Image (cartoon, helix red, strand yellow):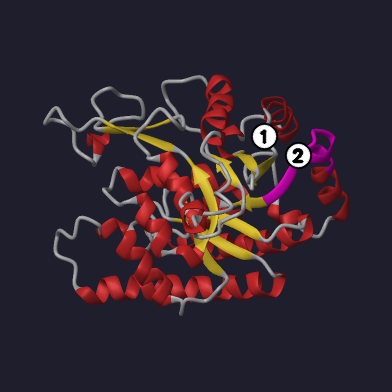
Amino acid sequence: MPRPFTLFTGQWADLKLEEVARYASEWGYDGLEIAVSGEHLDAWRWDDDAYIAERLDILERHGLKLWAISNHLKGQAVCDDPIDFRHQAIVGSRVWGDGDPEGVRQRAAEELKNTARLARALGVETVVGFTGSRIWQYVAMFPPVPAHVIDAGYQDFADRWNPILDVFDECGVRFAHEVHPSEIAYDYWSTQRALKAIGHREAFGLNWDPSHMLWQGVDPVGFITDFSDRIYHVDCKDTRMRMGNGRAGILSSHLPWGDPHRGWDFVSAGRGDVPWEDCFRALTAIGYDGPISVEWEDAGMDRLVGAPEALRTLKQFDFAPGEQSFDAAFSKQT
């Protein structure tokens, strides 16, 4: 205590890493969670010593440190079915190639392996990201989906990710999967099943982000305590719930972010309904001492205002536990 606070750069990939680092330093962040996205990091250059030194030098010049990197976008393509125009927009030309779906999945898997190697070269032990899912398309379970199809989806995840995790093990790096709709683990029970599918191997853990749990009705505090040995990283984003008018639903009616008709929306940390103090107390109770990374998303707020405000908001909950119980003095009475 206190834990380091970092800024996740995924939502800032339109800017150069140098500019994001300058902002983060000026706002008081301790480091960055750098995304393999935009110009920020290139996983295919993991063995380029000059490139690695140049990336680290940017952080050093701004007084920032690195505890984790992320590769959500390519991880999404490892298991997804279908692979379509949505993926072409996010995976980059090298992974997309000719767009053949299985080729995209294989190249995405190779990039995740290279991301583990990149993490080792950068001196960090955690990669945050997505897995994709062959079976997310069946989440409504209608038309009816036989059990063997769901079983095959978890097996597909294990078959595709175990070879990736083998490289993570070789590199001494852990993968922190972000529990998130559209992934193989998106809520409590799907997380249990995903861990079982890969034999609970230590290379695969979780990135705790309460924003995706809140709108699904999953308790983010209970999730921390129940998966205490698997919380490898923390991303902080908030969700504002407004379901009381009888019209809005949790599936959000294909409405865009920021639309006032939505029943929920992502907002800057502290402006939604995540019980942050309870969450931080739970993280302290399980002994989590890793970075607290701000993943800033709010369609109704300027990020240059919101990102520093979110840091100030969250820091007030990062207090150290007492050195002794408050009632310890009573036992000393004579």
Identify the residue shown where x is 18% and y is 60%: 141
Q: Which residue carries the number 2 mark?
A: 64
Query: Measuring 57% from the left and 64% from the top, which residue is drawn there?
Result: 109
Question: Which residue range is magenta in the image?
Answer: 57-67
Residue 294 lies in the magenta stretch? no
Does the magenta run of residues contain 58? yes
Quadrant position of residue 29: top right
> In percent of the image, x 54 and y 24: which residue is there?
309
In this image, 144 relative to 291: left or right? Answer: left
- Residue marked by disc 1: 29
Q: Position of residue 294 (x, y in %)?
A: 55, 38
Q: Contact, CB < 8 Å: mark 1 with mark 2?
A: yes
Q: Looking at the image, can residue 102 be seen?
A: no
Q: Earlier in the sequence, mark 1 or mark 2?
A: 1
Q: Quadrant of residue 312?
A: top right
Q: Position of residue 32 (x, y in %)?
A: 67, 41
Task: Give the structural element (helix, strand or loop) at label 1.
Answer: loop
Left/right of residue 161 with respect to residue 246 in the rendered view: right
Is residue 11 positioned above or below 283 on the image? above
Residue pushed farthest right? Answer: 50
Q: Position of residue 74 (x, y in %)?
A: 55, 54
Amino acid bearing label 1: Tyr
Disc 2: CA contacts within 10 A as few (<14), some (14-19) or many (>=20): many
Dot 2: element = loop
> Would residue 31 be seen by someone viewing this image from the given angle?
yes
